[in-house]
Image (cartoon, rainbow, N blue to C red):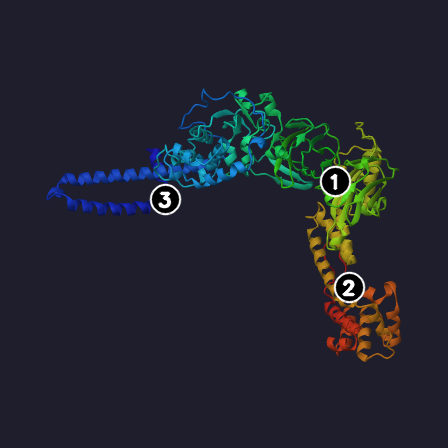
Amino acid sequence: MGNGANKASTLTTEDKKEDEKEEEKDNEEEEEWDENLPNGYSDMPIQGQMKKRFKNVVNMTRIAGRMLKAQEERAIEKGRQNTSLKEPEREEIVIPDTMYMYPPARPPKRKKKDVFHESDCILADAVATRVDAESVNTIDELVRELTIKMKTDLQKLRALFMWLGVQRIRHRTYPTTVDPSTPMGHLKRMALGRVSYAVMFTLLCRAAKLPCVIIRGIAKSASYEVGDKNVDSLRNMWNAVYVSGEWRFVFPLWALSAVVGKTTGDWTLVESKGDPMRERQEESAGESVSQVDDYYFLIDPEEFCFTCLPDEEKWQLLKEPISKRKFIRVPYLWPPYFQYGLHISTKFDSIIKTKKGKCNIAFKPGPVFVPLSYELFYNHKESDRDIPDDIQLERYVAVMNEADKTNFVLRLPADGVFKLEVVDEAKDWICFFKIWCDENIEPWDPYPIQSTIGFGPCKETENAGLKVETLAYRNGVITMTKKQHIQIKFTLLRNLQIRTELVHNTISPAELQNYVSHKILDNQLTVHLALPQNGEYALQIYTKDKAKGSNEEFRNACNYLVETDVKPRKDKGWENAREKLIRQRLDESTSTSKDPKEIKKALQTFNDLELINHGEVDRAQRRIGYLEVKSRLRDGINRRHVEVLEEALRRAKDSEYRDKVESMIEDGENLLKYLQHIKLYAHDVLALQRTTVSEIHRYNIPKQSIHDVMKATFLVLGEQEVLLEEWEVIQDLLRKAGRSNVLYKIEHFDTIYLDNETAQRAADIISPYDKSNLLEASAAAGAFYVWVYNITKEVLKWTGYYDGNAKTQ
């Protein structure tokens, strides 16, 4: 009673309206029925009771039908939300998993690529999309329609597989009543979760006389998390089909559906391609979507064994079957790992334990090189705590490019449980590792830079126009001494402009610019490198195609991690009074000082004593970096120099402190636009030929208009008006060269140097004239007139100095 009441109460307003319409229809039918009864019979008392009973039966049947329909819709919706990618445990169709006359289970002798070709799909896929489930009445009739034009068993199999894939089983509408033995009835039962993909696929294959078995076992589905040791709950079903003389795997459920957006809520993204993150994932069941993924169609056993483990060992179809223990421990490999032909050359394990916070995972490339990247996650649940607030985990993973492999070197500054997701350029997953970082960690510093291309020459190096020639420097790490000087030679593959930079965590680029240089001779680039002190550095080489013009941006072509050969620090377990004082001074300067030089000095003293880093170095380096970015921005804004400001803005935007200096970046960009706008006013003057300008100072007695325009020009440029009354003075000013030349002054002019009174006086001097008259008198005078006119109108829009917080008028 209670369940029935609850279900009846779920009827919608539309259902009630439908009841009212049907009730009106019933009343009309009752009246028609009464008119057709024999005379006198309609007045009998029993007739009213019969009509009432009949009406109740009809109403109850209608309600039951709608309840059944609503129940089926809920079941189908539940199937859509089934994001575990598991087959149902109970089914309405029971068939044997295998047949006694089938060939024995043996490993296939050929690979998928040797037996399955695109030509097998063309006709099969076309037929599969044209055969409608509603147009056939039996499975045999359906299979006959799908396979009648196919010449090979492989084409027949493909047609059956693709037909099942294009049905969008959980996303289509089904009639309320349908014969369960028809193809449409089978699809509806699949949508309701009463028939599995594996069973339906088996029915189709056996109707086509293709041997097909149902395999039961464990599958690392969307519910699996890398490193999980208990996988017994991941029960699932898939198929093996005997085609082209060999058994082949097909996993219809995984091939024809996928899950997106599923997360456990246990992980926090802390680093992506070197960029700092602090994105805590919310728990989400995800969403099941229909798709066709050919990877799980005829998949090779050597790849399938890492994802699915059959209950019967023989159905691994391997010459040397793997154990359940190995199945649990292998890395979580995704299809692109095999498609790219990658090979893990370090320990083949899903769980990697660090040694003092450091570990290494290496990949050997396949036939075609694929750039690899990563994302680093922190498990706050298994670690029993969130990431400490004073630790930002960027630049603690380095991608090291070597001739025959790509290394991911992790040196983590915090203990806990991490996950490394290796991805390709499109951020498609390649494989996952769980990283156990013990408490006995070294005080690791972050790597000097973050770079998507990693350290060492790579494919991007050649794409950027360089090819390394020095054999000793074909790997990502260079070890040298403080007093050593080295040369790295590259061949230029085209006409390039080169920029080199040396980067250190605590030493500013300005202080390092004298330690790296380069020369180009013919088509060879030589990079010269030295180091100012012991430590870890990053050498960055940038290129820009000269043929593409000045608007082309520099691209990072190659990086090296440069280390000095020094012994690691040892923790002696105690500190004397002086060492404690040095540590305290570093803490205090980091917390209170706004001068990066002061913090650097304290940090240098700290490092010279080789004190153990307990986080002080990290905090000091981040503080230095922030202050330098802010100082560089403030200097660029105050100097009001376009090139200096552009460089300061570029560095600020690329830095990890961008959010903290966002307001300064905004002010700097506004100023840059203004300065570029002012610079445009000088375009016509700077475009003048020197001979055109020289014509003006050759006038012995110029027209008054020309004299006045040049007087106004030099007045704006800072000369005294009383001297400009003499034409000879203006002639002398026009003859000056270098930084005193009039064109140089105009090119570097800034309205900050022009006061309101002088601007007004210059505007008054040129007010009697207009551009057209002056251009007729002299092209050069006309250009100077336009410049003075525009500059005087811009005065006082932006004057004063900038202190990082306010603009002072």
| Residue 6 vertical position relative to residue 772 in the rendered view, above or below | above
Which sits earlier in the primary sequence, circle 3 or circle 1?
A: 3
Check disc 3: other Cα within 10 Å, few if <14, some if 14-19, many if 20+. few
As measured in the structure, the alpha-carbon distance from the residue carrying label 1 to the one carrying label 2 is: 38 Å
As measured in the structure, the alpha-carbon distance from the residue carrying label 3 to the one carrying label 1 is: 61 Å
Residue 236, percent from left and from top: 50, 27
In the picture of the structure, the residue carrying the numbered disc 1 is 619
The answer, for residue 260, to whether it is visible in the render is yes
Q: Seen in the image, is 616 located left or right of residue 483?
A: left
Which sits earlier in the primary sequence, circle 3 or circle 2?
A: 3
In the picture of the structure, the residue carrying the numbered disc 2 is 752
Residue at 23% x, 46% y is 27
Residue at 26% x, 45% y is 23
- Amino acid at circle 2: Ile
Which sits earlier in the primary sequence, circle 1 or circle 2?
A: 1
Residue 599, percent from left and from top: 80, 43
In the picture of the structure, the residue carrying the numbered disc 3 is 12
